[in-house]
Amino acid sequence: MASYLPTPDLSHLKSADYHNVYEPAEDSFLLLDALELEAPFLNDQLQPRWCLEVGAGSGIVSTFLAGQVLGSRAVDFGTCFVVTDLNPRALPVTQATWARNGLALHRLHCIQTDFIRGWRPAAQGFDVLVFNPPYVVTSPEEVGSQPRGRGGIDGRQVIDQFLPIVPTILSDRGVFYLVLIEQNRPQEIISIMRDQYGLLGSIVAQRKAGIEYLYIVKFSRDTSTT
């Protein structure tokens, strides 16, 4: 019988908290499933030293990565975790989620910023980069609304702003996990990342959730040309 990693405990968060941060939903849980599937690679091959989640929200993803996927191995690797969010209310919520799940806060760096602007790791980039972006197709005027910003035209306005940043902060051996929906045109994004930035992408998880079809795409550097 297959064993499954437990979902982080969010019982400390109340309904009022979700007025300020995104409440985990199917996209969040598919991302957790993808990271669980990636656990053997992350632990046995990558052994990450620096991990970044952009748009931390409730903290469920970084908590799962640190506490369940990597677990005690994160201590062995000396892994540092960075989370960013433009929403100042998200950062204390993320810290509370880490504490609720028994994770050491000294390993967590919380930064209020847009994407990762104004901060760079001391090492040679991030080994694991995770982003569950605002991807819903909306009018451009709705982009940046809180607690869950909307994605604007094709749900791509925030995504397209972030894609050029990825190769500048990803380590040579790093991997980038991105949540997308069908309307974002995942295959087009995969082509853009390959042709413009030398990052190879593949879909590692997908699921139909209501009217949305969700994808988790994993990117890594194309080492065949080096």
Image: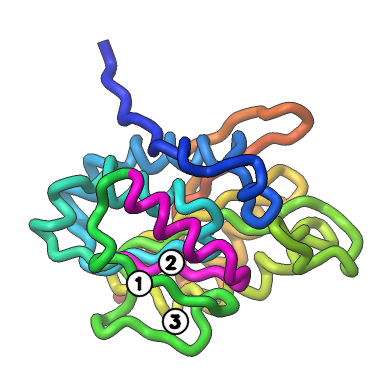
Q: Which mark is nearer the camera, 3 or 2?
A: 2
CA gap, disc 2 and disc 1: 6 Å
Tell me the crowding category of disc 3: few under 14, some 14 to 19, or many 20 or more residues within 10 angstroms, Cα based.
few
Where is mark 3, residue-wise?
Answer: 168
Contact between labelled residues 3 and 1, with CB atoms less than 8 Å apart: no
Task: Give above or below for 202 relative to 168.
Answer: above
* Callout 1 amino acid: His
- The residues colored magenta run 81-100
In the structure shown, which secondary structural element does the residue marked by tag 3 occupy?
A: helix
Three-letter residue code for mark 3: Thr
User: Image quarter for residue 115?
Assistant: bottom right
**Image coordinates for residue 89, horizontal then vertical, percent:** 59, 65
Residue indicated by mark 1: 109
Residue most toward the bottom? Answer: 118
Q: In which quadrant of the rendered view does residue 155 lie?
A: bottom right
Label 2 with label 1: CB-CB less than 8 Å:
yes
Residue beneath disc 2: 83
- How much space separates mark 3 and mark 2, taking CA atoms? 17 Å
**N-term mark: 2 or 1:** 2
Residue occupying image coordinates x 62% and y 44%: 23
